[in-house]
Amino acid sequence: MPPDPTSSPRLYQFYVGGTAGRANIELHDVQFAAVRRVQDAYPALRDAWFGDPGSLHLDGYSVIDWADGFDVHLAPGPDPSGLTLFFVNMGGYRADSLAELHAFGLFVAADAAGAKAKARRSLLQGARQLHKDDLREVDNCLALGAFGELHVHLRPNGSGKPPRPEWQGYRPIARKTGAG
């Protein structure tokens, strides 16, 4: 059921895709927004898209309400816990595949080094076990702190469950042109 548009904003994670320039394959990105409804994020997603504007589409999204042993909610003012929610993207290689492998996750830590260490222990483990010559490195580590006036707040909850996609598919969200 869609959230009540009068309710408080929630933290969404979006997986977007599209084309860019002379690229031969579709490209993807992950973006975050604090919004009441998915559609409220479209302007920010369009502004952040680096590729061909007319190709932008959603491939999926999740509401982030739990991560790495913590409930996640948005509230005014910084979280006093001293912890931060990090988005970590890792890339790696396998001897039997030309393409770079990617995996990403949300990790709670006091600093980026702690988040990266957690990511190395949990992401791309299946590939690492297949080949001893795998290379894995953290490509991106982004602190998710403030979204306008709202800040990410974390509360310990060891029994929570990782967010699952609320929707997956193909939904064009490119900027409309012309009258209308």
Image (cartoon, grey):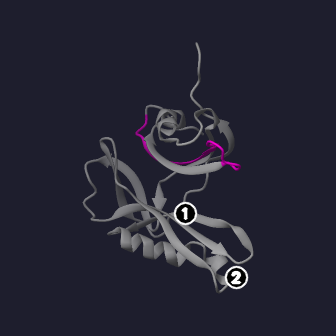
Give the quadrant of the N terminus: top right
Residue 95 placement (x, y as % from top left) = 70, 78
Of 108 and 74, nearer the camera is: 108
Of 58 and 47, nearer the camera is: 47
Residue visible at 47% across and 54% down in the picture: 65
User: Disc 1 or 2, which lies upstream in sequence?
Assistant: 1
Residue 176 placement (x, y as % from top left) = 59, 24
Residue visible at 49% across and 72% down in the picture: 119
From this view, report whether residue 26 is shown above or below residue 157.
above
Of 58 and 100, nearer the camera is: 100
**Label 1 residue SS:** strand
Q: Answer with left or right where residue 165 lies relative to residue 106.
A: right
Q: Residue furthest right?
A: 96
Which quarter of the picture shows residue 142?
A: bottom left
Type of amino acid at the residue the image marks with label 1 = Phe
Residue 78 placement (x, y as % from top left) = 26, 53
Q: Residues within 10 Å of mark 2 (few under 14, many from 20)?
A: few
Type of amino acid at the residue the image marks with label 2 = Leu
Q: Is residue 12 magenta?
A: yes
**Label 2 residue SS:** helix
Which quarter of the picture shows residue 144?
A: bottom left
Q: Which residues are magenta?
A: 7-26
> Is the residue under label 2 in contact with that under label 1 (CB below 8 Å)?
no
From this view, report whether residue 61 is shown above or below residue 47.
below
What residue does disc 1 label?
Answer: 104
What residue does disc 2 label?
Answer: 130
Residue 6 placement (x, y as % from top left) = 43, 31
Kindly tell me whether residue 12 is visible in this rendering.
no
Residue visible at 59% across and 32% down in the picture: 174
